Image: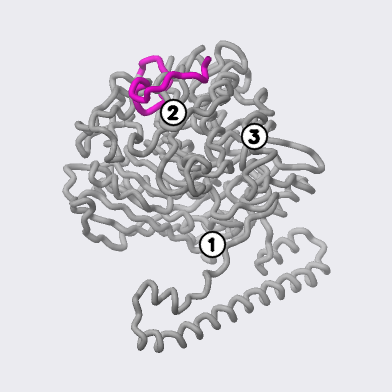
Amino acid sequence: MKTFGRFLPLAPVCLLAVMLSAPVSFLSAQPAAGAAPSRAGPSNPLTIENLTAVLALTPAQVAAITPVLEHLNQVQADVIQAQAALARLNSGLAARIGAVLTDKNQKLQLALLLGTFDDHQYMMEQLGITRLRPGKNGSTQSGPGFDIATANPWKDSMPDVLRMNNGTMVTSAGQWPARRAEILEEFEREIYGRIPANVPSVTWVVTGTTTGETGGIPTRTTNLVGHVDNRAYPKITVDLQASFTLPARAAGPVPVLIGFGGGGLAQAIPKGWGVGNLTPTSIQADGPALTSGIIGLTNRGQPRQPDQWGALRAWGWGLSRLIDYFEAHPDAGVNPRAVGITGVSRYGKAAIVAQAFDERVAVALVGSSGEGGVKLHRHDYGEAVENLTGGEWYWMAGNFLKYGTAEPFVKTAADLPVDSHELIALCAPRPCFISYGIPQPTIPGGIGDPAWVDAPGSYMAGILASWSAASSPGASTKAAIRRCRTFPPFSTGSADSSKPPRWNPPIDAVPPDPVGLPPLFAHAPPATPIISPGLTRPRSRRHPPRAGSRPQRPAGAHSGRAAIGAEAHQRAGHRDQAAA
């Protein structure tokens, strides 16, 4: 059996880790079966007890502040009631006016004018869908759809990464660009959507710089706003919000890890990295408002078409525009060829999508991404296609709804032309680090990741991304299922392509180092190799590359093995049982 690494830099380094850090849940509140997620309402009323607990107020201060809080909370309640009344009024007005309109476009424009337009219903109408299948109930985490033994009903339809659409096998590096283009086209058309050619340009402005210190290292933080050109449609304004923090005394341009939503990245600063934040909702709302944000601006306030982008592609587009800024401003101190992206949950989905579609993204750290991320669509375990088609459809292209259809036709995940292992493969030869929390029952108190996010399905996708079926049709799928039949124990695994990927805690985990990026985590033993087979040679943590060095492919880049895993097999003390 051939592997990606056999003939190339085709296979991405795919590191999968079970993290011991804070609990990570794919959704803050699991949706009911088939139901659209409830939109977050206003925060709970602020009470004097909450303030006192935080601010240690004196009795005199309590007496002065209490009436102010009571008034504020009453105003908030009045506003909520007014908003509800306005929504009812608009809905009633739309119904009364709509009753006398006969032209579909007139009704559409009325809905847009009154704010009653429903993208979900509009997509269903455009696609001829009258009923969708309900999604699973995320509150149960057990029963049908949560059983590993029955999770592979569509295994025989799993697409082969290295099989061209005409059936030709990819057997050389020279064939990969054509195969990559085929995979990209299908992901764009059916899953994540196309970015329209008329998307407006972005002008970045530095709004401020500050100095600080992280771990004893002086830092410089730059705040940016990216103004999107809205001259073609001034009714919508989009301003991208971003910032990045660099070691102030770096000798040259440094690699930078951008977080969708930021947070928790400060430990990278002492290792020679810069860190940054890109606010996804400044690009596109995390909700059904698809006639606003960058999607709405590009379409000039009109509905999107079924093959156009959803929020995940929009957030990735924003990252690409930030990389544009780094390329155009070498004085910013960032190496534009060493920009990484990280995110958790929905932002984990956005991270892998961003890396797959923009080849300038050097590395992605993908946390608990679940359905729509690196989890296989065809792995019927936890959250499924139907939960997105009836829930967070706005993350995806409108065409994605077809695969949750019940009437008048039926399509399932098995009908998708691509699957998530191919999304990982699009990142080749750049690495992606795929992580999930330890399964909830493992830790007392129930913390960790729920079955909902389907860590096994992502583990399987990582294997499939690194193996081809050149020897016989379906061989890679069968191998992946065999390896996943027994989930590997926590903190075990291998760096050998014939063994399953490694699952390890953060004290051992470091991101891969294919382009000379310094390691992120500070707790691993000093001589731990960052990555050993496939794309790179082992590199001691005692000697990270100097800041500003030009990323180069290491001499061991063509070792003939698929690159999976973070440490030597012997150090993990694991002997593969799954391949038996």
N-terminal of the pair, mark 2 or mark 1, is 1
Residue at the spot 68% in from the left edge and 61% down from the top edge? 117
Question: In the image, residue 210 lies at what x, y percent?
Answer: 24, 61
**In front of the other: 248 or 303:** 248
Distance of label 1 from label 3 (alpha carbons)? 50 Å
Q: Which mark is residue 147?
A: 3
Q: Which mark is residue 64?
A: none
Marks 1,3: beta carbons within 8 A: no
Q: Name the residue type under label 1.
A: Tyr
Q: Quadrant of residue 430?
A: top left
Question: In the image, residue 540 lies at what x, y percent?
Answer: 24, 28
Residue at the spot of label 2: 428
Query: Is label 3 in a helix, a strand or a loop?
Result: loop
Q: Which residues are magenta?
A: 558-580
Residue 346 in view in this figure: no
Q: Which mark is residue 233?
A: 1
Is disc 1 surrounded by few (<14), some (14 to 19) or many (20+) residues within 10 Å?
A: some
Is disc 2 surrounded by few (<14), some (14 to 19) or many (20+) residues within 10 Å?
A: many
Report the side of 90 relative to 426 (left or right): right
Q: Name the residue type under label 3.
A: Asp
Distance of label 3 from label 2 (alpha carbons)? 32 Å
Mark 1 or 3, closer to the camera:
3
N-terminal of the pair, mark 3 or mark 2, is 3
Marks 3,2: beta carbons within 8 A: no
Question: In the image, residue 570 lies at what x, y percent?
Answer: 35, 20
Q: Name the residue type under label 2.
A: Ala
Is 579 magenta? The answer is yes
Q: Main secondary structure of the magenta part?
A: loop
